[in-house]
Image (spheres, rainbow, N blue to C red):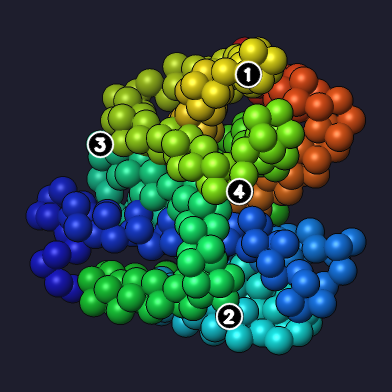
Amino acid sequence: MTDHSKDAGQGPSSALIILFAIATGALVANLYYAQPLIASIGPELDISPDLAGSIASVSQIGYGVGLFFLVSLADLVENRALVMGTLALTIVGSVAAATATSAPVFFAASLLTGLCSTGAQVLLPFIAHLAPEARRGRVVGSVMAGVLTGIMLARPAALFVAAAFGWRAVFWASAGLMLAIGVMLARVMPREKPRGGMHYGQILLSMFELFLQAPALRRRAAYQALMFAAFSMFWTAAPIMLADRFGLSQYSIAIFALAAAGGALAAPFVGRLADRGFTRVLTAGAMITLGLSFYGTDRAVTASSMVALVLLTVLLDAAVQTNQITGQRIIYAVPVETRGRMNAMYMTLLFAGGAIGSVLGTMTYHWGGWNATASAGGVMGLLMLLLFAAELRGWI
């Protein structure tokens, strides 16, 4: 173990936290690179317009599968070895995507990349476990800032790189980034061998039992699944709305996404407040902010106010980030031997919410324009508040 991994008595060092933030953000970004490049990738690989949407969704399907079947391995396999293995296979997937000459090869590569990008969800609870109780929220907040930044920057970064060097360069760049991160993690990431005592089949079956026995996990998973559904709904419909209502080009939409990524800056501040015991206030505030932000975007679009729309988008993203950090701080306070499975269940449900939100984004916008999308987001915020009120009364 090198001296750079931990500060004496203080948990993980600042350098290790920054590296984990970069690593998790870069891994999650792999799910979103293809999304704005559909128009370039589809024709070159002879993918019909009817199936073009699957270019972006296949990696997300792989991620969903990996959340359940790979992240749970963190309770069985030495964590650094697991992360190194997923990074190596992510590199293979990225290189295969960059060199693909047919749709089946590209889809298989995307599935592998998505599946193994779940290494991010091994790193996140790992760093939370290393942090002492008094700093856990701050540490999770810092790493989550990296995750959200990766999600927000992936689309504009892909557009900029593809415009300069072609779409294949995006996946080559991702492979190079994964290799660099793998080299750095191999040097400084601590080893941790799970206590064992269970085989893989027992690990998977026990996940359902853990879910039934952990009311805090069920509640926080429900809150964040709704939050992520709203987030995905927004970012599925927003590019269409920005082109329709504001006449923005792909480059301009990329700049809008860059500006909106400012919501990630709230993460370290939220983590500090969570460490001081303000989890309930933060949870309620995030739910209220999300609902009001969606309502406000409808007014901003009607008034054609780009400044107001950007500010409200930053608030919406900050709300999602806030609820995620407070939720993870709670569920990561579990015994180390169940940490991987708890996180796998939590993230699987979160991802399911995101997938539903992506479908709702297209459906609501085509049904009733941005007004319908914004109204659906407001309803999600209200539903979360009702669930939270039920928690406070001890009903759930």
Pick whichever, 283 or 49, lies toward us: 49
Res. 134 mark:
3
Q: Secondary structure at mark 2?
A: helix
Where the C terminus falls, by quadrant?
Answer: top right
| First in residue order: circle 4 vs circle 1 | 4
Mark 3 and mark 4 in contact? Answer it, CB < 8 Å.
no
Say which of marks 3 and 4 sits in front: 4
Q: Residue at image x 66%, y 40%? A: 239
Q: CA distance from mark 2 to mark 3?
A: 44 Å
Disc 1 residue crowd, few under 14, some 14–19, many 20+, Cα 10 Å? some
Front-most of 217 and 268?
268
Sequence-first disc among 1 and 3: 3
Kindly identify the amino acid type of the residue bearing the numbered disc 1: Ser
Instruction: Identify the residue at horizontal 23%, vertical 77% (top origin).
Output: 187
Q: Which mark is residue 304?
A: 1
Which sits earlier in the primary sequence, circle 3 or circle 4?
Answer: 3
Tag shown at residue 98? 2
Q: Are marks 4 and 2 in contact (CB under 8 Å)?
A: no
